[in-house]
Amino acid sequence: MTTRTTAARPPAPASDQFPELPPRDDMLNVIHLHEPGHVPALRRHYGNFDAIIIASEIPIGWNTSQREGLQQPDLFIAFDVDRAAIIARKGYDIERWGKAPEFVLEIASENTAANDERAKRAGYAQFGVAEYWRFDHTGGRQYAAALAGDRLVAGEYRPITIHRVDDSRYWGHSAALNLDVCWEHEQLRWYDPAARRYLPTYDDEADGRRAAENERDAERDARRAAESERDGERDARRAAEERVRQLQEELERLRQA
């Protein structure tokens, strides 16, 4: 399935801000994006916070005059932009930055699944979003597949190859991010193929801290055990020296008797 890009652009901006859009009426972004800590993990991965925006539910449009056809993705990533200016305008202005975001991801819900796979897909193609991904935690009961991605090629969306590891794990490579987007046991994960590691979630970081604390505790206990052993050896040596001294004194007393 492909989507060709055709769209008329609105006139020059009459305002320097996008309109306020209603918030999502479900908790899926919280559960699958924010609670695991994916947004800060991606920010730490790329660094240079001021020139990259990794954001959720911020409108995307040609310019701030656009009122119809705005897209409000669950997650989008754009490089070489002014993050503070985008936040100040309450939206991503494609004409201002000369390009659409490189990456967009939507999370399936009963209310939005059909729109995400049709109207939003066409809208992102018209804007020129380089990659458009869909994640369905239900494993394909809301979207057509548990994980799907499209890459814009010559103005059309072409499917990105999704690899099946088993019934609980799927992944596809995002050329825009140079990361693998993963569906693992109903969870969204990001894998860095260059570093051969997952970007850490909050739980991963907590487990790492606990492991480091346990390692420090074990090292402390081993150090204390070694110190106790040294103290025991020292006390035994001193006791032996004291016993030798006492025997020498006894022998001297017997010689003088």
Image (spheres, rainbow, N blue to C red):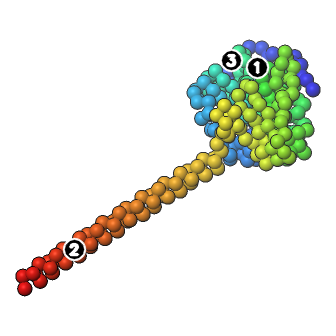
Q: Are marks 3 and 2 in contact (CB under 8 Å)?
A: no
Q: Earlier in the sequence, mark 1 or mark 2?
A: 1
Farthest-out residue, front: 255
Up-down: is 60 above or below 98?
Answer: below
**Count of picture labels:** 3
Figure quadrant of the N terminus: top right
- Where residue 12 sits, quadrant-wise, is top right
Q: Is residue 68 visible?
A: no
Is residue 200 shown left or right of residue 142?
left
As drawn, the label of residue 97 is: 3
Q: Could you tell me how far apart the alpha carbons at marks 3 and 2 are, in whole angstroms?
A: 88 Å
Q: Quadrant of the C terminus?
A: bottom left
Residue nearest the observer in this picture, 46 or 197: 197
Q: CA distance from mark 3 to mark 1?
A: 10 Å
Task: Tell me where residue 32 appears, x and y as whole percent.
Answer: 74, 44
Which of the pair 192/228 is nearer the observer? 228
Give how far apart the Cα atoms at labels 1 and 2 are: 95 Å
Q: Position of residue 146 (x, y in %)?
A: 85, 41
- Marked residue nearer the N-terminal end (3 or 1): 1
In the rendered image, which quarter is residue 109 located in? top right
Say which amino acid is labelled 1.
Answer: Trp
Q: Are marks 3 and 1 in contact (CB under 8 Å)?
A: no
Which class describes the residues within 10 Å of circle 2: few (<14), some (14-19), or many (20+)? few
For residue 239, say whether it is visible.
Answer: yes
Q: Secondary structure at mark 2?
A: helix
Sooner in the amino-acid sequence: mark 3 or mark 2: 3
Which dot marks residue 244? 2
Mark 3: amino acid: Trp
